[in-house]
Image: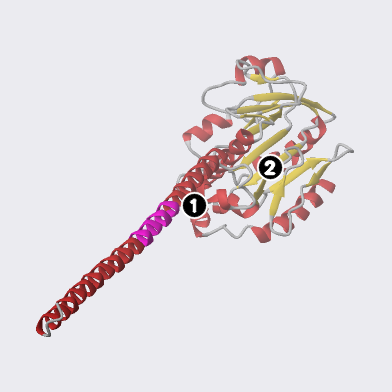
Amino acid sequence: METIRDAEAQRSEIQPFIYAQNTQNIESQSFAYELQSKYGGSSYLDEERSQYDGMEVTEEEYWLKYYDMPDVNLEWNNGILEEKPMSDRLSYEMYEWFLFLFKEYLKSFNEGITIGLELGFRLVTKHGISIRKPDLAFIHKDNPVQLKPLERTYRGCFDICFEFLSDSNKKAVERDTVVKKQIYEGAGVKEYYILDRLGNETAFYYLNRNGVYQNIKLSKSGIIRSKVLKNFQFRLQDLYARPFLDTLIDDRVYRNYVRLDYQIEKQRADSKESEVEMLRKEAEMLRKEAETQRKEAETQRKETEMQRKEAKVQRKRADSLGQELYDLKQRYGIL
């Protein structure tokens, strides 16, 4: 009952921020139902998979035969095979966007590694033994058990597990939202994210000091902040809107870790551009000073030319007066 109340509480908190459940989502869902109705609700592949789901096998048999089967993705829970549901386009798009965002964070803050590709880990809890293959998982660099490059199973406990819901089957949904939540909680997975492409079951949990999952509270502006990763945060609404990541570099929620290499290069380019602009302004200032000096020189030249012309006029006038004086002296016999 506590688990159900927690899930309902977080669902009521999350729903107001998920308004991107647009007609595309509804149309995709309706189309899927139409196909199921037209073809009897199952395909040949579904029938093939159903022969494994629910089958009783030992743990040894699971590891030897069923763990890495090529055509079906199977988990194991207390002696029973459980088939992971097939993904759909919306779920994959959410997965792709979130994975890129998460990898951007780890590239900026080297706090550990991400794991996917159907790689599983073994969990022992009060509920029994379970082998799970999270859609995405994270191993912190401080985790005492690190995954070696060629290992195909993880022998420790993931720090964060992510499951992307893409199946309307009640049993499959309950497996991710209830069963796995209990198992991950009991095994000590520090955070568990359930990401539903329709937003109905989306939930975020962290392990408190008592070893019990609590909801990661949304901020007033709809931000989810990890307890395990110091600086990882994202806007819940963006899981559904999925904006281009290049547009996030100016967003205060993401700019501390998204495309830092681009931001650094952009800062360098802006710095160079500022430097070029400063040099251009200095050159323009020097040009204006030179132009001012040229104009001053031209003014000085004109003044000098005027003075030269005036001196020439004065000289001619003096010569004329001297000639007149000479003529008068001659006329009056003064000479």
Point out residue 96 in the picture as x, y percentages from the top left corner. 54, 40
Name above or below for residue 273 compared with residue 68: below
Residue closest to the eye, 174 or 57: 174
Residue depicted at x 63% and y 52%? 252
Q: Secondary structure at mark 2?
A: loop
Residue furthest out toward the right: 210
Q: Mark 2 vs mark 1: which is more N-terminal?
A: 1
Q: Position of residue 50 (x, y in %)?
A: 58, 32
Which of the numbered marks, if any, corresponds to residue 28?
Answer: 1
The residue closer to the viewer here, 284 or 29, is: 284
Q: Label 1 is placed on what type of residue? A: Ser
Q: Quick one: SS at disc 1?
A: helix
Image quarter for residue 194? Answer: top right
x, y percentage for residue 114?
63, 30
Does any portion of residue 1 appear in the rendered image? no
Q: Amino acid at mark 2?
A: Phe
Image side of residue 315 versus residue 60, left or right: left
The residue pinned by badge 2 equals 232
Q: Looking at the picture, does residue 199 appear above or below residue 147?
A: below
Span colored in magenta: 281-294
Image quarter where the C terminus lies is bottom left
Query: Tag 2: Cα neighbours inside 10 Å, few (<14), some, or many (≥20)?
Result: some
Depth order, front residue of 207/129? 207
Residue that sits furthest to the bottom in the current view: 332
Tell me if residue 211 comes above or below residue 1 in the rendering: above
